[in-house]
Image: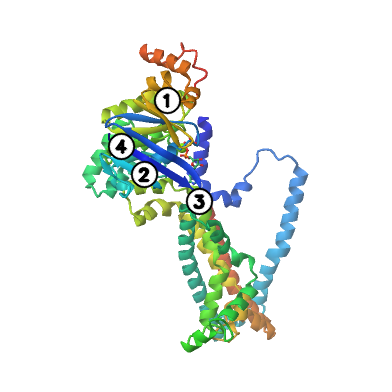
Amino acid sequence: MKDQIEHSYEQDIVGDDIYSIRKVIEPHRDDVDHVMKYVLIGIAAVFLSVMLIMPLAVVILNALRDGWQAYREAVLDEYTVKALQLTLLATVCAVAVNTAFGLFASYLLSKFYFRGRQVLASLIDIPFSISPVIAGLVFILTFGKIGWMGDFLKAHNIKIVFAVPGVILVTIFVTFPFVFRELFPVMNAQGKDEEEAAALMGAGGLMIFRRITFPHIKWALVYGVVLCTARAMGEFGAVSVISGHLRGKTNTLPLHVEILYNEFNTTAAFAVSSILVIMAVIILIIRSFIERKRKI
Amino acid sequence: MYVEMRRINKTFDGFQASKDVNFGVYKGQLAALLGPSGSGKTTILRMIAGLDRPDSGDILINGNRVNDIPGSKRGIGFVFQNYALFRYMTVADNIAFGLEVQKKSKKEIKDRVEELLELVSMQDLGKRYPNQLSGGQRQRVAFARALAPDPQLLLLDEPFAAIDAKVRRELRTWLKQMIGRVGVTSIFVTHDQEEAVEVADTIIITNQGRIEQIGTPEEVCRYPQTEFVKDFVDAERFEALMAIKKNGNNRCQNSPFCGTIN
Ligand SMILES: Nc1ncnc2c1ncn2[C@@H]1O[C@H](COP(=O)(O)OP(=O)(O)OP(=O)(O)O)[C@@H](O)[C@H]1O
Ligand SMILES: [Mg+2]
């Protein structure tokens, strides 16, 4: 019995990484079936090569096809830089908003009980289940000329659709659940005993968060931010609908890639893509670093 | 009466967890809330601590109605069922937390932490983290942490539940001594009759949200007032326990009830 309890407590401590893949692929002492093992490894390797490694190689090779000079030109092109700036702006906004929201929402849903708790939790997941294109359309219908808020926005001279605010808004929408999804299970697993204990000793909300809640969710938070960043940078569908493709104004990097490609400017398209690929790789590295950290 | 519950009712989502709860505990006493699982023991404790609010009725501590006073101002130390130690703080920091909140001076905190570590015989373990401790050690830390701000009332929710049967016996003797030494009024929750009989001055028996009987261990065991108490309390076991107590024999080998404990 003691062992059991000890064990469950330990699990509590490392409970954060129940979502980590690492745990699943931990080595077994004896492999039951060697043939099976190598067949599966083979399938995985082939699949990954065809689906991931080859395409990435193609991007890089094509980007450099016309030489380093052409690559530089494409990357430093005025519109590319503008697109990159907008992508970064939208990403930063989305991450900031969704981090703040994710923190509040997961704190609320894991530490308080109230009617409609379940409903709220499912509502937050909506962006996961809605196609980004439809998300873009919804925003046009809400904030556009013919939309519900069209007249109001026009009267106040606020432009959202086919403008930067629209791009930012849909990016926020599409990446809405990421931070919450990472934080919620961790906060929920923590329970609220520690918080209650601290509150009983007279600690205020901020102190409780700083000393007790935050250390527990730190890595989940960073992880959520990383996922959110990755998704925000790559968003195409929703942004495509709402941006209006105004070159140098509302084009994000993915949109810019599409335009270049449609203009048969393949080298440039791949060069710009490579920026996204490089950012993705950086994020991947950060991500695996965090996974390791969370395991400790 | 130091703590008093008067006609307390509490409902969770239509489920009545406390029904007209009335009882009092004298200053310096050690009282046990004893009852089957789900009978509302934790609910009562949480209401006294201000973690839950009763729907109706009055809670009095030291003669003052505290219903509207936040738990942190009621002078209470609380030991949670699973201890709820702050897992990202060392043992010493856990104990110091309540004092830090009260903005005590560094020196004062340090002295008090040392004093408490000594009290619970854990002088050398101050730098450990909770997950590096055994169940019994955790319990002692939780106890020290609850006592650090010098509470007038100590509430313990199943303090021995997470500890294996052998150590449990030692720990409860220890706890009783500690509480006696500190002289703090205490209420602890248990669903183990033996525990209640051995440790408590007063036993409060709960069942389905109601209080069935209040009395000394002897009273509730020898003179059960309701059918429930009669069934719930094992009088034979009680007599055996009393015999053991009288003979000062805590080793239990001689008792026919050794095997049946827990
Ligand atoms: N927050 C809550 N929401 C809904 N129901 C609750 C809540 N807290 C307690 N209850 C219900 O109230 C009843 C009494 O619960 P309580 O935790 O006080 O029992 P207990 O005597 O401490 O039991 P145990 O020995 O199992 O800890 C239970 O039926 C429980 O389901
Ligand atoms: Mg309980």
Is A243 placed above or below A111 here?
below
Secondary structure beneath dot 3 equals helix
Image height of B154 relative to A140, above or below: above
Picture coordinates of residue A271, whole percent (x, y): 62, 77
* Amino acid identity at mark 4: Val
Q: Out of B10 and B130, give the one closest to the viewer.
A: B10
| Residue A148 to residue B100: above or below | below
Query: For the residues carrying marks 2 and 4, which lies nearer the camera in this image?
Result: 2
Q: Residues within 10 Å of mark 1 (few under 14, many from 20)?
A: many
Q: CB of mark 2 within 8 Å of CB of mark 1?
A: no
| Element on which disc 4 rests | strand
* CA–CA distance in space, label 1 to label 4: 22 Å
Q: Residue B170 sits in which quadrant?
A: top left
Give the amino acid at mark 1: Glu
The local crowd at label 4, few if under 14, some if 14 to 19, many if 20 or more residues have their Cα within 10 Å, is many
Q: Secondary structure at mark 2?
A: strand
Question: Within 10 Å of the Cα at label 2, are there few (<14), some (14-19), or many (20+) other Cα atoms?
Answer: some
Mark 3–mark 2 distance (CA, rounded to whole Å):
32 Å
**What's the residue type where badge 2 is placed?**
Gly
Q: Tell me the residue that label 4 is attached to.
A: B3
Q: CA distance from mark 3 to mark 4?
A: 33 Å
> Are callouts 1 and 4 both on one chain?
yes
- Name the subunit of mark 4: B
- Lower position in the chain sequence, tag 2 or tag 1: 2
Residue at mark 1: B195
- Residue tagged by mark 2? B57
Do tags 3 and 4 sit on the same chain? no
Residue labelled 3 has its Cβ within 8 Å of some atom of ligand 1: no
Q: Is residue A66 visible?
A: no
Q: Which mark is residue A188?
A: 3
Tell me residue A208's x, y (percent).
Answer: 37, 52
> How far apart are labels 3 and 1 at the CA level?
32 Å
